[in-house]
Image (cartoon, rainbow, N blue to C red):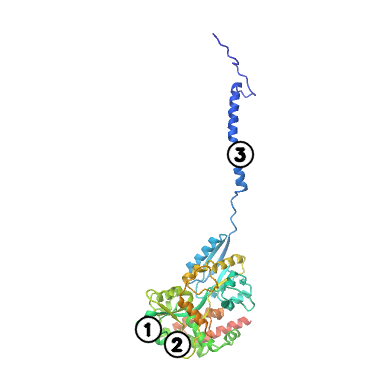
Amino acid sequence: MTIPIRNAMPDRVSGLGVPRGMDAVRITAQQRFARARAPLAMALLLAGCGRNAGERPARAPPQTTITALIWAPDWPEEMQRVAAEFSRENPSIKVNLQFMIGNSVEANLKPKVAANKLPDLISINPNDYAATLADQGVLTDVGQSAAWNNMLDTLKGDWSTAKGKHYGIAGGVAATLMYYNKEMFARAGILAPPTDFEQFLLVCEQLKKAGFTPVMWNGGFPNILANGPFSFGFANNVIAGTPDWKARMAAGTLDLDTPRGADIFAKIKLVAARGYAQPGYMRGDYEEGIRLFTEGKTAMAFHGTWASGRLMHGKGFHTGVFIPPWNARGQTVVPVIGSETGFAVCETKNKVAATKFLEYIFGRGFPLQQNKRQNISPLKRVQGAVLGDPQITAYIAAVGAYPVTASPYYSFLPAGTIDMLHPLLQDVLYGKVTARQAAHDLDQSIKNEARKTRN
């Protein structure tokens, strides 16, 4: 029996060739798929809109690179840490740290100034050379900075020009002093430190006879000889008897070609000539000088408070300090105390960023370098712990109360004279020039610099 099939020949729907019965099924499935896909598409659309509108990759802040030229003969690692911490806290500012070389700050700066290729932040000394740069507009006035306001008032005069510009911040309170090995002194039968130069020579002789090297002499790094025995010689031979010495030096009328001027150099030569300095003292550089004392190889070190963190912590002995007795018997010693080499900002396009770094050096960054050096802070308030030895603190308080004091040589000599003094000191020790010839050369250099300033 044949059963008839209804609509055996399918109708066509919309010309698609889809059987009418299957058409309903397929459209329904497509609709369900479309409905299921719609929320996902909307979510993706919204997510895309959200990325474009609200999650656009953050634009990196403009990067400023500042160049800092720093004098840090025995603490470069600490300065690198200060710079790294500053950049970590201020990611938009990178510090290109460079270190000065040679024997003086001025010798590093003068070529930069002459070529008009100034760093953004520099180490600088508080002297006429720096003051001239400030008055010429080379250095930025930092008188409105927090670091300036926080600096000890007693130091601010060192960093101010006659025209009222404030050009730098002291790295610390600087004094040169004699560090001594208490155990060596006791074993040599020395009961008390000497109080005049004649006694000093006797102490050296007593130490030598006991088998000790009396004193460390930095012949290979004359900067320390200039800070120590030269500065003390100038203080006690010139400043002590010439109240108006600064005015005379500026006018070119200070006479140093004299027996007292020659005696400054003669004392330095005498200590070495009598065998009181270490063997090979003309090769003794900055680092070796400190190491010789801290390892107990010399009984004394004529050095600065800026290195007390190492010199006060010798290996296996106790360290004491006393005022270098560069005075004649019966005369009051004139000690040396003033500002350490400090920091200044140059008038460059990056001076705002450099000033920010200056503030950090004397703010959160100060303990990062002071804790190693253990120098005397130049600040009224310090952000963090300050380390130091009570003997150094007491020394600074004591010499600060003296009726007459002198500054370190880098604070009062003309820049040209600073540069010639270092090799001159070495020539005296080598015997290439006499003490009297050295006094003549020093005298002529200072007078020539005064003439240049007047012209």
Q: Residue at x 59, y 72 (%)?
A: 149
Instruction: Tell which of 37 and 241 is nearer to you.
Output: 37
Q: Residues within 10 Å of mark 1 (few under 14, many from 20)?
A: many
Q: Which residue is mark 2?
A: 197
Q: Label for residue 207?
A: 1
Q: Residues within 10 Å of mark 3 (few under 14, many from 20)?
A: few
Q: Earlier in the sequence, mark 1 or mark 3?
A: 3
Expressed as whole percent of the image width and height from the top left, the position of residue 315 reads 38, 73
Say if mark 1 contacts mark 3, CB within 8 Å.
no
Expressed as whole percent of the image width and height from the top left, the position of residue 278 reads 39, 79
Outermost residue toward the top in this view: 1
Q: Is residue 291 left or right of residue 410?
A: left
Give residue 253's quadrant in the image: bottom right
Note whether 439 is above or below 316 in the view shown: below
The residue type indicated by label 2 comes to Phe
The residue type indicated by label 1 comes to Leu
Q: Earlier in the sequence, mark 1 or mark 2?
A: 2
The C terminus: image quadrant: bottom right
Instruction: Tell which of 409 and 90 is nearer to you.
Output: 90
Expressed as whole percent of the image width and height from the top left, the position of residue 14 reads 65, 24
Q: Earlier in the sequence, mark 3 or mark 2?
A: 3
The residue type indicated by label 3 comes to Met
Foreground mark, 1 or 3?
Answer: 3
**Rounded to the nearest whole Å, what is the CA distance between mark 1 and mark 2?**
15 Å
The N terminus: image quadrant: top right
Foreground mark, 3 or 2?
Answer: 3
Identify the element where label 1 is drawn.
helix
Q: Which residue is mark 3?
A: 42
Note whether 84 is above or below 198 in the view shown: above
**Rounded to the nearest whole Å, what is the CA distance between mark 3 and mark 2?**
94 Å
Q: Residue at x 55, y 85 (%)?
A: 444
Note whether 166 is above or below 196 in the view shown: above
